[in-house]
Amino acid sequence: MSLPDLSDPGFLTITGAEKRYGASAVLGGVDLAVGSGEFVSLLGPSGCGKTTLLRIVAGLVAPDRGRVVLDGRDITRSPPHRRDVGVVFQNYALFPHLTVAENVAFGLKAKGHPKSEIPAAVARFLALVQMAPFADRRAQALSGGQQQRVAVARALAVRPKLLLLDEPFSALDRKLREAMQIDLKRLLRELGITALFVTHDQDEALTMSDRIAVMNRGAIEQLADPVTLYRRPATAFALGFVGLSSRLPGTVREEGDGMLRVETPLGTLRAPGRFRPGSPVLLGVRPERIRVSGDGPNTVEAALVEVAFQGARAHLFFAGPDGERTLMAETPEIPAGAAPGARLRLSWAVEDTLVFPAEPAPQREAA
Amino acid sequence: MTAPAAPVAGPVPARWPLLRPDPVALLALPAFAYLAAAYGWPLLVLLARSLSGPQGISLAPLAQFLSDPFSWRVIGNTVRTALLVTLVCLLAGYPAAVALARARGWGQALLLLSVILPLSVGVVVKAYAWQIVLRRDGIVSQALVGTGIWDAPQRLLFTETGLVIGAANVFLPFMILPIYAVIRLIDPRLPEAAATLGASPLRRFLTVTLPLTLPGIVSGVAFVFSLAVSMYVVPSLVIGDRYQTLATLTGRAFLFMRDEQLGSTTAVILLAVAVAVVVGSTALARRLGGGGHA
């Protein structure tokens, strides 16, 4: 994972952004700094405030409090047409009364580019997104993927300092989406565009981002690069929202030297961490860290409930003593003797056991 | 984009298309039959009468009517007031339609009610009300004197200005409602996208909102113009006999002068003017907007 040059981590700086609609707070004082050329995702469930934050940066929503500084200029009170911030909307928002080329030319005309230069610029950006043959089509006559690429070309043609993307892939089918994610990421890297990307799709965020801000209930719970976010989620919410995991509620019995003994429905397990004895906690394990068979400090015996073969790997679901699905393991092959009903021994390393303070109400079940 | 819904070709081509009608066309049949009997047929009779001279079919009555300068003054009155009424309705109605489309909840319900409710008040009642409002000692005159715009009270009643004011009031909903219906369908992301591309509010309006509302404007203009060009009650009550339009002249010809020849001729000219303006404005809008894509 090559990170972009972060010599200027405050190319876009959001400080204390707050927004309420009536009695409900949508954003409760969010801070975020994005470096020049960086691709940062805002990842969270619907209603977490990620789109509101994006609209505040675009100037389409005025924050109640807080500041937005872009490239050294405070744009908090600037109208959207004086911000140099491009937006690719979820439904693309192409102008239906204009052709593809006219859509791309729209911003160039609005910004007063010399008329003689516009056709060449339009042609160049349409070529960048492989849409040159469609220049004279009407926007509505295009497929979803084509519309999305025109929307990207239209937003980039005016050379914005910052590109905002609001779930631009959500209307596309999976295969197309994956291909376009890679295309878009490469295009933005080649052009050195700084981008803020809103998504509720964790795979999309992991694939595309330099850093990911996990948002929940109007706040950023963790801001980290994809590897750190996956391996060391900061909160139980981040664990549940990014990637698959097994989640076990438990109570701390002993703590010594940063090592815990936690009592769970599957027995006493060991985990690194500092909690007072008696604290309710949540243990998490990533599925690929669980070994089927074998012994270790954390070994449990559980009944196999279901095997889901996925081609390149298999997912095994296990039930705890209460019969609920509690553990999930990922293996490259379906292990021998892995028939539903079989009792298998599972083990994982102590350092692969993640510990979080117990949440009042879990946001998402273990998959 | 809005090509007429052609039936998908079935396996067996219909040999007698009239005997196997499109089920969608059947839905329009009652209205079509009613209009054909109650409107189309009398119209044909009227047209025939306007073209029938003593020696059979001839254009003589028409030519005779058009050779009279009085006729041209009547046609001028008709077209001028209709255009003025349409213009006033467009200028007042467009912002109202925008406000109506942007309002939410109770505000929108109240606005909508205030547009639709006046339609339930009869035109005669409204015209009488305007008689009172436009009098020399009426509320408009008093207000204009009170604010210092006028030096002395004047009457607007029996003037063309008064007619335009009164008629615009009657026909305003027919401008607001079609424009409102179209604005409501415009994706609010489109002006937002235009803003993020650097377009100022004025530019957003001129290059995005206005072209996209053009179909609504055309409907509104067509409605109001065809209503205003043929209005009869409002001019009769607000301006009186001294001022003739094609519609009032048609009425007088049939009701008082018993001159069916003249009445048919003026009625046909009126119809031709209305159709020409409506068809012309639709064609113009289609060219400006580059095709129907509402």
Image (cartoon, coloured by chain):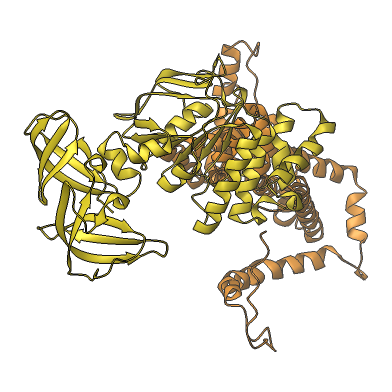
Chain colours: A yellow, B orange
- Where is residue B137 shown, x and y percent of the image? 57, 21
- Where is residue A117 shown, x and y percent of the image? 82, 32
Out of B18 and A102, give the one closest to the viewer: A102
The quarter of the displayed image where residue A308 is located: bottom left
Position of B47 relative to A50 (above/below): below
A123 relative to B144 in the view: left or right: right
Residue at left 39%, top 64%? A310
Residue at left 60%, top 53%? A145
B183 relative to B248 in the view: left or right: left
A222 relative to B141 in the view: left or right: left
Give the total number of marks visible in the rendering.
Answer: 0
B142 relative to A212 in the view: left or right: right
- Where is residue B257 shown, x and y percent of the image? 76, 54
Residue at left 10%, top 58%? A321
- Where is residue A98 shown, x and y percent of the image? 71, 45
Q: Quadrant location of the C terminus of chain A?
A: bottom left
Q: Is residue B18 visible?
A: yes
Residue at left 25%, top 51%? A366
Out of B116 and A160, give the one closest to the viewer: A160
Out of A226 and A103, give the one closest to the viewer: A226
